[in-house]
Image (tube, helix red, strand yellow):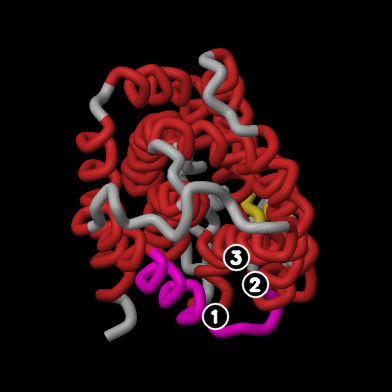
Amino acid sequence: MFGVPMAEIALLLGGVLGGGIVTGLMAGLFGIGGGAVIVPVLYEIFGVLGVPDAVRMQLCVGTSLAIIVPTNIRSYVAHRAKGAVDHAVVKAWVLPALAGIAIGSVIAAFAPPAVFRLAFVVIAAVIAFKLLFGRDGWRIADDFPGQAGMAGFGLMVGLSSSLMGISGGSVANMIQTLYGRTMHQAVATSAALGVPLSIAGTIGYALAGLPHQSQMPPFSIGFVSLIGLLVMAPVATLVAPYGARLAHALPHRTLEISFAIYLLIVCARFAATLV
């Protein structure tokens, strides 16, 4: 089932390494863990390896969360060195976001794979629309809401992270800019929040996939492929600081448009799998 010719393995390895480079750049540039890049790459790899469709998307999401753990850490360190992280927001969001991660992990154990692809399409399209057509005047308020509102936002960020295999940066960036934060500030804060979310998500998906262990490829723990982790994570981690430097060098609007175009590409990729 998992036997693949060496030529195909070499091609897949090249794809994973290339995906790792792009993942690291995206993590530093946009404050995302790179899951929206990793998941499509892994989806094709696991398809060639014969992973059943019923668990392939969950395996991609869980492996993505594991891969982006070290990437998030390095991205956060790079942004923190520039003093751009709003730790008050991180503190307010982290516990409800972890609750969202737990809910998403439970969904992973029972929901069909189309749920995760649909999550990619809907969330990516909304964020891209806001970035492309939004105006500086598009603000809910000049400052964040009270404790209940912040808890709701944290839950939203965590759930989207767990369903999409990302660190939550995509949604967190949108929320922060609607409350008056610059894109550079939002990116840095999202990078910080992504560290605990990706760690918790990895653990959750590993546990959620244990009942499906017989369907997993070799060297997997639940919905986490150790091979995918060991090949892609080191490359992405090394590249992440370069993306962070580029983020602080680019104009604000350029960063927004680039992020939106990227999200639309991801959106189109997964929308095609739903038809």
> Which residue has dot 3 on it?
156
Q: Position of residue 189 (x, y in %)?
A: 56, 36
Circle 2: element type: helix
Residue at figure coordinates x 67%, y 33% from the top left: 87
> Which residue has dot 1 on it?
54
- First of labels 2, 3 by sequence position: 3
Q: Is residue 217 visible?
A: no
CA–CA distance between discs 2 and 3? 30 Å
> Which residue has dot 2 on it?
215
The magenta stretch spans which residues?
108-123
Q: Image quarter for residue 151?
A: bottom right
Give yes or no for residue 120 being in the magenta stretch: yes
Name the front one of labels 2 and 3: 3
Marks 1,2: beta carbons within 8 A? yes
Residue at figure coordinates x 78%, y 75% from the top left: 211
The relative height of residue 172 versus residue 125 in the rendered view (above or below) is above
Circle 3: element type: helix
CA–CA distance between discs 1 and 2? 9 Å
Q: Is residue 165 visible?
A: yes
CA–CA distance between discs 1 and 3? 26 Å
Left or right of 172? Residue 178 is left
Left or right of 12? Residue 141 is right
Residue at figure coordinates x 32%, y 42% from the top left: 11
Circle 1: element type: helix
